[in-house]
Amino acid sequence: MRRTTSVLNVPAPLACAMTLCLCTYALSSCADWPGAEPTNTLNDVPVQIEFDAAGCPKSAKPEALGVDKAKRIVWQSVNAAGNPINVEYVIWLDPFRGGNPLKSNANGVRKSPLFNSDAPPTRGGEIEYKYTIVGTSCEDKPLDPHFRLR
């Protein structure tokens, strides 16, 4: 007679393997869940996007942002006092067809994807990129900050 561990009448080794697979899948799918907050690590460069009361982006700080290719940017919407607020926005890095904007979560947070290690070099070893922040409730007043990629 076989020993079972579940109501499904599955042999114990198979039940353990199935449980491990399901747990691994569940944990890996949470990483990009829209409501999940990005984890801040040593490889994150924080940027605060100040929004006004109408939901329009006013500034991005720090203004002179330098980012190493091995790092990622984490944007957070804040009020004039620098406190986190729940304002959703979209960041456009690529205006061409097929380019996907980066959408914040409901908490006003968005982590950048990894940078392409093949980004072209320039004089001084840094590349300056412009990106556009558009508040979802204020699409007619975008903000165009820059960052330097090293």
Image (spheres, rainbow, N blue to C red):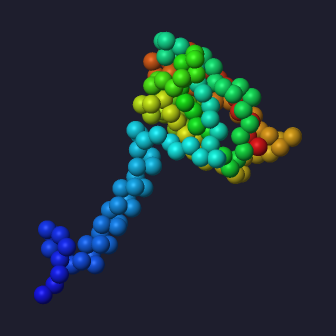
Query: In this orientation, does residue 98 appear?
Result: no
Residue at image point 59% right, 46% down: 41
Residue at image point 37% right, 59% down: 25
Residue 22 versus residue 70 in the image, above or below: below
Residue 62 is left or right of residue 13, and the answer is right
Total residue callouts:
0
Residue 74 in percent (x, y) is at 58, 37
Residue 86 is left or right of residue 81, and the answer is left
Residue at image point 64% right, 47% down: 43
Residue 47 is left or right of residue 21, and the answer is right
Tell me where residue 112 sits by quadrant. top right
Quadrant that contains the N terminus? bottom left
Q: Residue furthest top?
A: 53
- Looking at the picture, tell me which residue is in the foreground, 96 or 68: 68
Q: Residue furthest right?
A: 123
Residue 136 in percent (x, y) is at 46, 22
Residue 2 is left or right of residue 20, and the answer is left
Residue at image point 71% right, 25% down: 63
- Looking at the picture, tell me which residue is in the foreground, 71 or 131: 71
Residue 85 versus residue 74 in the image, above or below: above
Quadrant that contains the C terminus? top right
Query: In this orientation, does residue 148 appear?
Result: yes
Tell me where residue 68 sits by quadrant. top right
Residue 57 in percent (x, y) is at 56, 19
Residue 17 versus residue 137 in the image, above or below: below
